[in-house]
């Protein structure tokens, strides 16, 4: 059974996979990326090869190398490196889980398979169990994202009795707005010290009040600092400040959502904010348009996330 | 322009329409129903002829009579009686709006039409405007429920500039879990003193923290008292207690959701809890099964919503 | 029990409801509309107050008057006038059914209610039965359109034993592309002489080969003549010609579908082709744009549906 | 540019991947499987590693070995062996395409990626082009299955100008019931001699009349003979017989659809009908239940697909 050094908590950045202009992985900037997260954003845990990291667009060989690089570069700097090892093929998922254990990652996470789909929670648990068994010493997290997978099994039902089947089960990334389901995960399983990580960045506050113990998301790459301020205000029961931070974050996300917001756009924004080149995404995605980048930059300045250069740039609603 | 006596806030019960066994409206119990809400549940505002009230299953003539009865019986007892006047036909909606003004209801609410659907927010606003114009002295509320109507227009965009088109606009019932959209409604329009009423009972706490000023829902008919306790704890910044109340409510709703939960089941539960016969629903709905009612009763006892008769009945997780 | 004069078959035009520029019903042109259908399009049966007719956007009083006008104007000219009496409220549906019998329409049709929805085929049958019972002398048609109603009950299951519950049941309008369901309706119930009317105009040929006995649709208002040519070719087993007609029709529908195609656009096209002013639709719909109308007109000319004025207009793929 | 020996046409069986009871691939029966298809079902072309073959549940190494085995065993027996090389990762798809060329398969097919999804037809075409370029000598087929992938790009639009981007493009497997889209694929591109293969077995007749040149599906593994009879009747313009065969096939599929029908059930049915053990599916699927198998067997007997043993077994509607 797993005995994790410590519980996965706080903000966890879903890392982007930096690429060169010709679409190959740009391993050379991952070291800088680690430093940037820790020093500039105050984010000390990462979630590698997930949706944001284009994990399923990479080959298995690439996923292994990417995981390895993050673990190596993060050593002594990051608290926890969790590797997403979900795949449509159980065998490949198992291979990745085994590899994560070999490179001494801090945990693995798995999405429900979503082409041929599990009929019910028992089959899904069986699938997850087979993956977990390939890395029996690593904490296991379930990545719940029904809107993307179309797998409609409620997380709360899946958690019922899960440690009997998956002894390494340590929590879940819950990427959905159904806070009845999320709340009941927390309510029914609090005593087990699971990590209840929320995955809808733009409404994290609504999950904190419902018992979330942390969050995994793409925007923590560049809004980690601001989100950490929200977490601190919430901890201090300063709800008015917490809500102000949440609204500030929402204004930005709401703005980009209307322009079309996904992995491609996250890469463009992260490049803007961090100065570290994330490069283009890989097909079937396309690089964000110049127009998107310009608009996002202006908005980031107006919200004081990027430094503004003149008073006119500044939004009357700039967040403090 | 409307000058509401006071803002619609706190819990608003979406009333059920009591029926006799042969499917006719049972006007005779509405007086008792009013007293029950006020005295037993501490609920002083109501939302009549909505989804819960089978409003769209009634004829226009019936909707008028039902509205009239609630206004009459609620006089000097209820704070506000809001009539849902939404219909697929603009003309019928206007007729109901005009009638609501005549009987001196406190406000009207309108759902987006959902057979032939508005293409964009401007057309929807035009439709709502035409309804509102039929009752120019009444506060107007928009009833946002995209999952049921399939109308995907974001509330936050609809609210942009709405008072220029609909001067009586006073707020919205937001029946969705997209708290980015809800949060931005609150954030962008706080200064206008709109009512931001949340409509997903089982996760009300998540909306309170995001700025909800009240709630409209079916469960406040019988869980109003417990939900009011949650509101009070939240007001006092006692978040731990608030979360306990929310979880208690979630346990019940989660339980019935798994059995199949809708208007029919709400009628059965309300009959159980209040002792006032709600009767069957009208076709195309069917009466809740005996099995449902028995299970719901046991659960209500175990959670101390209904008095339990023996210690064995009592759930170890009973809410305090 | 009903003894229909004759079976509903061939092309049935789903009539548009003509309106004046200020949105009132323009009864004055219905006589011309009847003549146009019969004389220019060879269409002798109609389906009134359906989706195309904005039936659910009209008040009950208006639906009655519209039905009456079509029956009156169609006397001795049309073969059959079927009135759609579906409504969200059973009472209103019954009122309309009774009225259709009084004005001596040739049949009634009913859609499944789609706000509060029937749970299963038995409840839906109960609902339809109550409507049919209000017009015990009229043939009854079920209008199956799952994509619009979200009611997922298979038609083939609904038809199983339906005449025991609804003795006047005479057939269905099947507006879906699931030809397994449609084929099994035909296969399992051929001996009962039901009308199997297909409702997806752009692929009617695929249903004819599966046993369709007729078709109900909006495009038969202006493409009736061309579609009748397809039916004749199919009757004569000249499948090559039938396919040519189908492709010609598809080219037009495919063209307008890409521009956005619904009731508003149908009104614009019918005005163009027939010269009879259909007027704007009623809210929540908006008038088709000038750009749409211009494009549709050019396409109709290129396909020889409208007369072309110069050789350059003519499409190389013009249908013969 | 590819110069295929001959056009892919007629029935193409989407092969199941036989497995042993412990979930490993059972290569040993593939030779028998080939003989069975050719000799008993009259099916001479196959589609390997698609949905039916659990292609996306296999590892890349397994997909290579499976492809190789079918090509080897099919030599001089089968007309064409098409390998599905679609994957979420472009790199893996390219690897599989290259491999298919090396083993001298007769063509490759590719599904649209469906986790991160292409925004529009141009991006999808770019993705497909990159795969096709890895096997420049092989005919390329696009596998269109929007209900499973959620990629809503219309096939007809994708085909527009596709040979300029993908010179090896030879046709598509169209697994959808939108016969406007399918019809316009045929209509607009007939002169190019593409293969228009329909993929909804239960309504193949509706696509034949719309110009389908062949069909790819799972049921041709065991209903190939009966479907070939339908094709022959259709060729001879004996539409009445063709419809009888289609209805017979529909009765079986309609029956199993109601029991729950997918890859697991196809494996059970194929085992029953062919006598060749297909074994269980791999997780996330589960073996079909004993109850399913018993019911399917009885139905197959009643329809004369399996030999019946007593007169009582025989359905009054048995197909001739």
Image: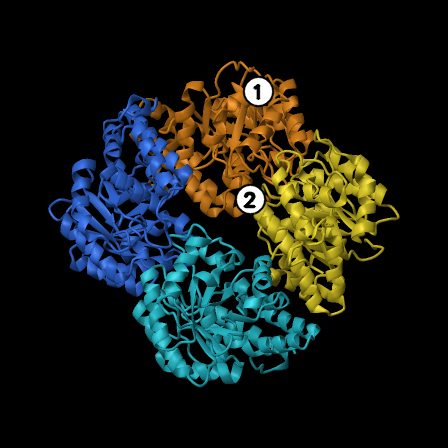
Chain colours: A yellow, B cyan, C blue, D orange
| Residue B94, percent from left and from top | 34, 65
Q: Which mark is residue D288?
A: 2
Subunit that carries the residue with mark 1: D
Dot 2 or dot 1: first in sequence order is: 1
Left or right of residue D116, residue D147 in this image: left
Residues at discs 2 and 1 both on one chain: yes
In this rendering, is residue C183 above or below D157?
Answer: below
Mark 1, Cα crowd under 10 Å, few <14 / some 14-19 / many 20+, is: many
Q: Please identify the quarter of the rendering in which residue B97 is found.
A: bottom left
Q: Quadrant of the C terminus of chain B?
A: bottom right
Residue D250 vs residue A87, the one in the foreground: A87
Residue D13 vs residue C108, the one in the foreground: C108
Most extreme residue toward the front, as rendered? A311
Label 1, secondary structure: give it.
helix
| Residue A179, percent from left and from top | 61, 61
Q: Quadrant of the N terminus of chain B?
A: bottom left
Left or right of residue D235, residue C33 in this image: left
Q: Which residue is mark 1?
A: D74
Label 2, secondary structure: give it.
loop
């Amino acid at each position: 059974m797993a005995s994790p050094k410590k519980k996965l908590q706080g903000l966890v950045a879903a890392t982007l996979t930096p690429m060169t202009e010709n679409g190959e992985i740009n391993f050379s900037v991952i070291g800088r990326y680690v430093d940037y997260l820790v020093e500039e954003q105050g984010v000390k845990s990462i979630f590698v090869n997930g949706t944001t990291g284009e994990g399923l667009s990479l080959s298995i060989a690439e996923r292994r190398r990417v995981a390895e690089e993050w673990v190596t570069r993060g050593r002594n700097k990051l608290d926890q490196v969790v590797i997403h090892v979900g795949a449509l093929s159980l065998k490949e998922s198992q291979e990745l889980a085994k590899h994560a254990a070999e490179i001494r990652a801090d945990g693995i996470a798995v999405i429900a398979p979503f082409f041929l789909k599990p009929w019910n929670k028992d089959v899904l648990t069986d699938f997850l169990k087979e993956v977990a068994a390939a890395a029996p010493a690593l904490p296991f997290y379930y990545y719940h994202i029904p809107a993307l997978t179309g797998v409609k099994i409620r997380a709360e039902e899946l958690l019922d009795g899960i440690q009997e089947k998956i002894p390494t089960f340590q929590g879940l990334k819950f990427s959905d707005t159904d806070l009845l389901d999320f709340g009941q995960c927390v309510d029914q399983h609090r005593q087990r010290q699971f990590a209840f990580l929320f995955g809808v960045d733009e409404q994290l506050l609504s999950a904190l009040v419902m018992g979330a113990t942390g969050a995994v998301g793409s925007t923590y790459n560049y809004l980690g600092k601001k989100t950490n301020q929200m977490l601190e205000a919430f901890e201090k029961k300063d709800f008015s400040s917490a809500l102000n931070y949440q609204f500030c974050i929402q204004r930005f996300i709401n703005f980009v959502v209307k322009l079309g917001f996904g992995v491609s756009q996250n890469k463009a924004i992260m490049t803007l904010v961090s100065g570290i080149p994330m490069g283009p995404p890989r097909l079937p995605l396309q690089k964000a348009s110049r127009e998107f980048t310009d608009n996002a930059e202006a908005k980031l300045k107006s919200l004081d996330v990027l430094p503004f250069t003149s008073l006119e740039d500044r939004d009357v609603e700039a967040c403090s």
